[in-house]
Image (cartoon, rainbow, N blue to C red):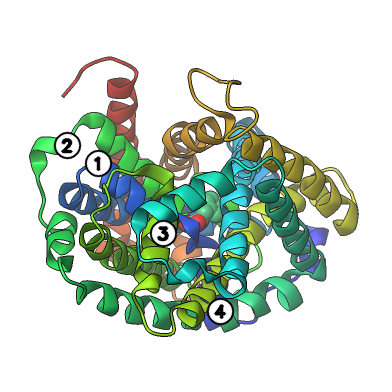
Amino acid sequence: MKESQHRATFGGRISAVLVAAGGAVGLGNIWRFPYVAGDNGGGAFLLIYILCILFLGLPLMIAEFSIGKATHRNAVGAFHLLDRRWSGIGYMGVLSSVLILGFYLVVAGWTAEYMIHSFTSDLVRQTSAEVHRHTFEAFITHPWKPVFYATLFAAATHLIVTLGVKEGIERAAKVMMPLLFLFLIVLSVHSMLLPGGIEGLRFFLTPDFSKVTASSVLTALGQSFFSLSIGLGTMITYASYFTPETSIRHTALHVTLLDTLVALLAGLMIFPAVFSAGIEPAAGPSLVFITLPTIFGSMPLGELWSTIFFLLLVIAALTSTISLHETVTAYLQEEWALSRFAAARCTTLFTALLGALASLSLGVLQEWRIGGLTLFDALDFVTANILLPLGGLLICVFVGWRWKRDEIASQLYAPTGGAHRRPGFSIFRFLVRYFCPVVMLLLFLDNLGWKLF
Ligand code: PHE
């Protein structure tokens, strides 16, 4: 494997955790998780989400890390090396990354616009949720502004990806992740103390199982995969840059914990504020963009907090757009033998174009529907609810049934070995061989109309 010797690596254990967590933590936790939880009844969704993370997400992340670390290749190349017949998983992953970038860049652009607005306009002083709703709707349907910001975001992502794995990707993640945490904690405490906030806590933390359907379970599964960035080869790509000393199990555990903690904090920040301001928790993708400015309006020095918060959101989004971009760029670079610049340029051009169309689909191109959905919603739905769970299912089957037991054990327990005696390994094997594939298959069939539950 000549190439692997020229490949970059991340600094070490902590870098690996921070970079992978940077790829995982993003708008999925702070923008998507609260609105999807709000749409699906709150507390019960949270519980199912946590179960999905534990029993499906974590084993799958370990599986993806093992593939990446064993092969030192991009998502497609890894399967070329292990067993060509399974390369479809890699291709599907690259396609999913492109499609996710299509709508992710748009939302990332919104966060950039909100960051800039926080200190250039007096909008932040408004305390009415209605005013913020109007402002948000006017902005996202504007014929060029959101397209401009999405393009700006694509350009920033391009710049960091072309700076390279260590200088660009690793540095950005190391500085910003700790800051994001600190800020989320401060804001969630503030939000819980708002008048009426307790109602929001109750909605978020008390399960109401009458709201649970098979489709909300699939949504929780899709959200957990989306949030952990699994099912599409991003974590295969990132693990291909791990050093030999990086422990797959510890990294996966830490990344999963950090990612879930951020989603929880986001819920604790959003729901009390939603109830305090009298907003519908099922308001959809606009939820965070209406709620947060409403909280900032009621805070002393609101402009400052708002600017810092949206700056952190921009960074969280950027570390994720980088990971998606890297998945496609690494594939084009290694499998098409392009230079890193050319590979990154192709990725940026194509995804920025898709992003522009997705953004316009909320405004001037609103009439243009795919299966009744706007392009923006269709990209979100198809990736999170279909492609990621399907990718996850196939990766589990590959690692559980096709990959030899000893090979995976040597990835997980190198260099100490002794996997056979470890109960954790048997649990992992059981989950990837039986539990994950069966649960995912049943959910799929149910959603396709075979009413099983
Ligand atoms: N996990 C990222 C987030 O939560 C989104 C993402 C999905 C990034 C898939 C990479 C791959 O925002």
Residue 338 sits above or below residue 448 on the image:
below
Q: Secondary structure under badge 4?
A: helix
Callout 1: 10 Å neighbours few (<14), some, many (20+)?
A: many
- Say which mark, if any, is on residue 199: none
Residue designated by label 3: 29
Separation of residues labelled 4 and 1 (CA atoms) = 31 Å
Callout 4 touching callout 3 (CB < 8 Å):
no
Callout 2 touching callout 3 (CB < 8 Å):
no
What's the residue type where badge 4 is placed? Met
Question: Residue 115 is drawn in which quadrant?
Answer: bottom right
On the picture, is 444 further left or further right than 112? left
Front-most of residues 452 and 140:
140
Residue designated by label 2: 212
Front-most of residues 149 and 399:
149
Residue designated by label 1: 40
Callout 2 touching callout 1 (CB < 8 Å):
yes
Q: Secondary structure under badge 3?
A: helix
Mark 2 vs 1, N-terminal side: 1
What's the residue type where badge 2 is placed? Val
Residue designated by label 4: 176
Separation of residues labelled 2 and 3 (CA atoms) = 21 Å
Tell me where residue 127 appears, x and y as whole percent.
Answer: 36, 66
Mark 1 vs 3, N-terminal side: 3
For image coordinates 60% across by 74% down, the residue present is 244
What's the residue type where badge 3 is placed? Asn
What's the residue type where badge 1 is placed? Asn
Separation of residues labelled 1 and 3 (CA atoms) = 16 Å
Callout 1 touching callout 3 (CB < 8 Å):
no
Separation of residues labelled 4 and 2 (CA atoms) = 36 Å
Callout 4 touching callout 1 (CB < 8 Å):
no
On the picture, is 150 further left or further right than 298? right
Callout 2: 10 Å neighbours few (<14), some, many (20+)?
A: some
